[in-house]
Amino acid sequence: MPEVMIITGTRKGIGRYLAEYYTGKGYSVVGCSRSEMDKEIAGYEHHCLDVADEQAVQQMVNEVRKKYGRIDVLLNNAGIASMNHILLTPLATVRKIFETNVFGTFLFAREVAKVMCRQKYGRIVNFATVAAPLKLEGEAAYAASKAAVDNFTKVMAKEVASFNITVNALGPTPVATDLIKGVSDDKMDDLIRTQAIKRLGTFKDIVNVTDFFISKDSDFITGQTLFLGGIS
Amino acid sequence: MRDKAVVLVKEAVSELNEELDYDSLRDVNDQTPLFGGESGIDSLSLVMLVTTLESAIFDELGCTVSLADEKAMSMRNSPYRSVGALAEFIAEKLGEV
């Protein structure tokens, strides 16, 4: 029986790649985003929802559990960013960032872990960022939200360990997606210079880590945040 | 609705007790203590009970409910204290849906 995976934020960027990659590897993948997919993926099921909408998240997770009987993996990828000086950042922007990045991650992790704890198995991977350890100027709200995800990952890992559920996080460097399209080349070059390995990240770099975290052999790996590119 | 809730709670407790194997949970009735009572269910078992019940409510009644909402966490008389109290709480929740 194929393993069942939920991926959030699958309409574009890293999430879309993850959905294509893991359906290609034989997983039953169910994903979500605020709007419909532009192009369908064979073997992939899509739900339209806001990851911060508690009722909608509960409904989706219940439907997946009822249809597939189990949920093996959660990739909590959905995230938004906003670059701005703190003094020019509206509260509404901060609220939106925390709703998607923190509350969305929390809700999916909580609801999916409820299913995983009954089946006594699960792999949860949250998405952090190098913007947090690098303390990037102009990204206070984004970095703070992802720092929250980092700590949430570590605490949750302890709370669900006895159910044989692992919870880890991946901190990608910038990857060429819409998330960084508003960032100038100069700024991007400065950022990449801070990495031990000085290049943009790729989708392959990301699945290399998610493959490791969700492997059945990684049952002794939990509460870890792995940053790409040599950032720590 | 309360009768249905009692059935669901009893079924969930039986399922949980397949693993726990507590004498006190073999023959359950309204008064059977759950969390914080003599039965000695620990917090992880309570997590299992709540998640089992939320799933059963969705599967059998098609409703999405949270049994660990703010009200449950702050109630002076915990809805998790006995089978009857939990059934009462669920019936109340379902009335709100």
Image (spheres, coloured by chain):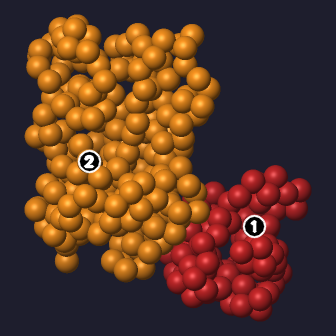
Chain colours: A orange, B red
Name the residue rendered at 46%, 39% in the picture. A101
Kind of residue indicated by mark 1: Tyr
Residue A115 in the image: above or below residue A11: below
Image coordinates of residue B92 in percent, x first then y, are 80, 75
Residue at 75 percent of width and 54 percent of height? B70
- Find residue A117 and report its image quarter: bottom left
Looking at the picture, how far across and down is residue A206, in whole percent? 18, 39
Mark-to-mark CA distance, 1 and 2: 43 Å
The circle drawn on residue A137 is none
Relative to B84, say whether A49 is above or below: above
Relative image position of residue B22 (x, y in whole percent): 62, 76
SS assignment at label 2: loop
Q: Which residue is drawn at 41% across and 10% down?
A: A137
- Closer to us: A227 or A104: A104
Residue B52 % position (x, y): 55, 74
Q: What residue type is labelled 2?
A: Lys
Q: Nearer the viewer, residue B91 or A42?
A: A42
- The subunit letter for the residue under badge 2 reads A
Q: Name the residue under label 2.
A: A12
* Residue at the outermost right position: B76
Q: Quadrant of the N terminus of chain A?
A: bottom left
Q: In this view, does A126 lie above or below A198?
A: below
User: Is B89 or A51 nearer to us in this picture?
Assistant: A51
**Residue B80, disc:** 1
